[in-house]
Image (tube, grey):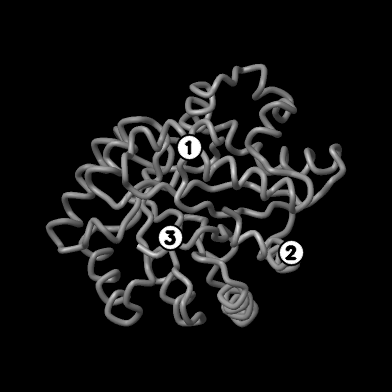
Amino acid sequence: MQLGRVGIWNHELARTDPSEQALFGEAVAELDELGYGTIWIGGSPGVDRAAKVLADTRQITVATGILNIWWHEPADVAAQTAALAAEHPGRFVLGLGASHKKLVNDYRKPLSYMREYLDGLDAAGQPAAERVLAALGPKMLELSRDRAAGAHPYLVTPEHTARARATLGDAVLAPELKVVLDTDPETARATAREHLAIYFQLANYLNSLRTLGFTDEDFAEGGSDRLVDSTVAWGDENVVADRLRQHFDAGADHVCLQVLGASLPREQWRRLAPLTSVQ
């Protein structure tokens, strides 16, 4: 699994409006040229969306971040990933996640359903070495270690990365990091709070943050400064580089940057590209 050191996470790339595809194609091709290791397509994309991004790039890895396991049959996903592997060898990573009770009809125990889903992928021949799981808690992290190549945690801190590494052993650890390139504390935190608002309505993220020492007071009124500053790297490129190093020092193999404040933040991606060499 060739993720590189630093990647880009963007949910707009999951959109399929035909009028946007030329612009998206130019954007992902530039990410490839800028030297990022992986493009993570957010917004619960299907494998078909990754196929389009792969076709528009030459060498960068493309990952689903994440495919919602409630919306896709494992046999179909296995067949689609096999086709991508044949056409773009070594360039696709299947990121899988169990989504949220609030967003899925007939939701049941996510860990149990993920195990069933992985059974289906295994039966259809989809290689465990080509998939990662969206994992926050210890049991899903253990499943990521035992039934996949590793984990892709979202909305986490370097402390979580250290805990995840302890559970994962040598498995891949690829956390997401939110970024606001703005040195003004008031406007930077406002951008971060606007983005974080939806996650304060989702129990699994709140539970995960609680294990890191945050409380209901931190979730009130858009999020405390402490929570915002811990989960979002706001400031200039040096601030982002420092947070990257914290995740790497804590055990991350790869960190994907989600730039907040713009739907397709190409200028910011260019500014951050030198950070692909951060150690």
Q: Is residue 172 above or below residue 165?
A: below
Q: Which residue is mark 1?
A: 161
Q: Earlier in the sequence, mark 1 or mark 3?
A: 3
Residue drawn at the location 56% of the way across and 67% of the way down: 36
On the picture, is 252 further left or further right than 109? right
Say what secondary structure mark 3 lies in.
strand
Q: Which residue is mark 3?
A: 64
Say what secondary structure mark 1 lies in.
helix
Q: Which mark is residue 189?
A: none
The label nearer to you, 1 versus 3, is 1
Callout 2–callout 3 Cβ contact below 8 Å: no
Q: Which residue is mark 2?
A: 271
The label nearer to you, 2 versus 3, is 2
Q: Amino acid at mark 1?
A: Thr
Q: Disc 2 to disc 3, how far (Cα)?
A: 24 Å
Say what secondary structure mark 2 lies in.
helix
Residue drawn at the location 78% of the way across and 38% of the way down: 189
Q: Disc 1 to disc 2, how far (Cα)?
A: 25 Å
How far from the left and from the top, in percent, is residue 191?
Answer: 76, 44
